[in-house]
Image (cartoon, helix red, strand yellow):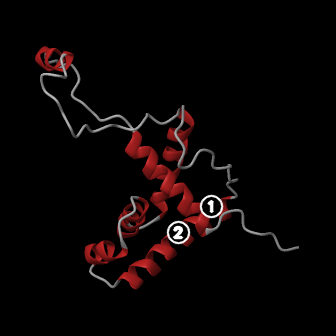
Amino acid sequence: MDRKPIWDMDDVEARFLDAAHTAYRLPPVRVQGYNNPWMSLAMQTPSRYPDTERVYRPMSPSPEAIERMLETMKWVQWLEIDQRHLVWMRAKRYGWHQIGRRFACDRTTAWRRWQRALQTVADQLNALGISQRKLEGIGEVDM
């Protein structure tokens, strides 16, 4: 009886996209113990310093999204270093021309290498028998 593989390239791609999105939504890392009270005083009166181009950070990800991201980050250990960079650049939605420039190859060659890397991860997941969890909330705001 033929069993359909649990993981395919589309599922692996979706998990890497979700991991990149979750990593973007994490709060910025700051030096602990450093506090400047002048900035808080300046921000109390925003009419004094109007900022027409405010930078809004997205909401922090849920703990489940962080767990999925950490699980996905373990998968990159199965890839070579160049494949890791390639998969992560594509997950961050870099264009194929930019990726091709980074790896000194044509965009179609970069695409084939990316597909090979995703297939490597999918094959490894299927060989280990890791069950696929339903991807909840991709592209949605976790509350």
Q: Amino acid at mark 2?
A: Leu
139 sits to left or right of 105: right
Q: Could you tell me which quadrant the C terminus lies in?
A: top right
Say few, some or many: other residues with alpha carbon within 10 Å of mark 1 (under 14 / 14 to 19 / 20 or more). Answer: some
What percent of the width, then of the height, locates residue 112? 46, 81
Give the residue displayed 56% in from the left and 49% down from the top. Answer: 138
Circle 1 — which element?
helix
Comparing marks 2 and 1, which lies closer to the viewer?
2
Q: Amino acid at mark 1?
A: Leu
Above or below — where is 124 with respect to 143? below
47 sits to left or right of 91: left
Query: Which residue matches tag 2?
Result: 118
Q: Are marks 2 and 1 in contact (CB under 8 Å)?
A: no
Asked whether residue 74 is in view, the answer is: no
Give the residue displayed 68% in from the left and 49% down from the top. Answer: 134
Give the CA distance from mark 2 to mark 1: 11 Å
Query: Which residue matches tag 1?
Result: 125
Q: Could you tell me which quadrant the N terminus lies in?
A: bottom right
Q: Quadrant of residue 30?
A: top left
Q: Residue furthest right?
A: 1
